[in-house]
Amino acid sequence: MAKDYYAVLGVDKTAGADQIKKAYRKLAIKYHPDKNPDNKQAEERFKEITEAYAVLSDAEKKKQYDQFGDAGFHQRFSQEDIFRNVDLGDIFREFGFGGRGGDDIFSQMFGGAGAGHGGRHHRRPAKGQDYLMRLSLPFRQAILGGERRVDIERNGQTEHLQVRIPPGVESGQKLRVPGKGGDSPAGGPAGDLLLEIQVLDDARFRREGSDLHTTVRIPFTGACLGTTVEIETLEEAKRVKVKAGMQGGSKIRLKGFGVPARTGQSAGDLYATIEIAVPKDLDSAQEALLEQLKDSGL
């Protein structure tokens, strides 16, 4: 079910950090488990407001939530991502709670993330937030691979990255660039940059799995008598013989000229579909010859 974190905390989307913290403080005092023992409804409400606070109190998570909405945000962030870098112990100490510490409540309610063996907490410095960025690639580069420059904003500065594009990437696939996400506030490793690939359409080629498809036009006479045509591939043109009597819609297969071989997969093929070019304008000599062919039963 979709959530509205702003509504959960009872604040407007324009609320600043202090307003968000104040709203959470008020609700946390009301629904904290130490004040509501054995009250499942209060516990669920406490989970809900704590999750909302974990997102809206973090500038980068809040930005992603505002940009993509609840559904899009949860496609990009797991619960572990949501609570990464959130120190509930500090929050609850600030709110004046005794009893169970923030880590104990977090462990019980949210699956034990951050807890060590035997109930003791050996917290490693939290990793920084991962960044998500869409990267549009020309069709040929997505198929063949190569290098691509990516500019990102980190810590108020523009960084220029050279990213390796593996052959055969597809739309929706994510490439991970380690250490180029957000810095860790606790001295841990930086997050990663996730590049979500969008492959642009190509005027000549389309992809089906590991195979590529294109078209090639041959003249009417070539279809009848046979001919030689040039078929464009992603890297070079190949001259191919077309046998006499070739029908429109037939396919010529160029083995290994599709998506390059990848780990566990062989190279795909290129299929060129025959289109027979019928002339729109004929001179008188051509019309006379075609009339003779027509009279001969062709």
Image (cartoon, helix red, strand yellow):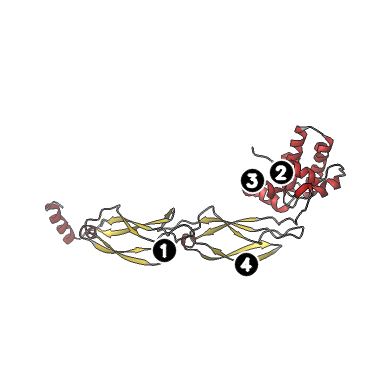
Mark 3 vs mark 4: give the one in front: 3
Q: Position of residue 36 (x, y in %)?
A: 82, 34
Which element is circle 1 on? loop
Tell me which amino acid carries mark 2: Gly
Res. 234 mark:
1
- The image quadrant of residue 41 is top right
Q: Which is more N-terminal, label 1 or label 2?
A: 2
* Location of the N terminus (image quadrant): top right
Residue 238, position as x, y percentages in the image: 34, 66
- Mark toward the start of the polypeptide (4 vs 1): 4
Q: Nearer the viewer, mark 2 or mark 4?
A: 2
Residue with the mark numbered 2: 111
Alpha-carbon span between mark 4 and mark 1: 28 Å
For label 4, the crowd category at 10 Å Cα-Cα, with few meaning under 14, some 14 to 19 and many 20 or more, is few
Spatial CA span between label 2 and label 4: 39 Å
- Which numbered disc flags the more N-terminal residue, 3 or 4? 3
Q: CA distance from mark 1 to mark 3?
A: 38 Å
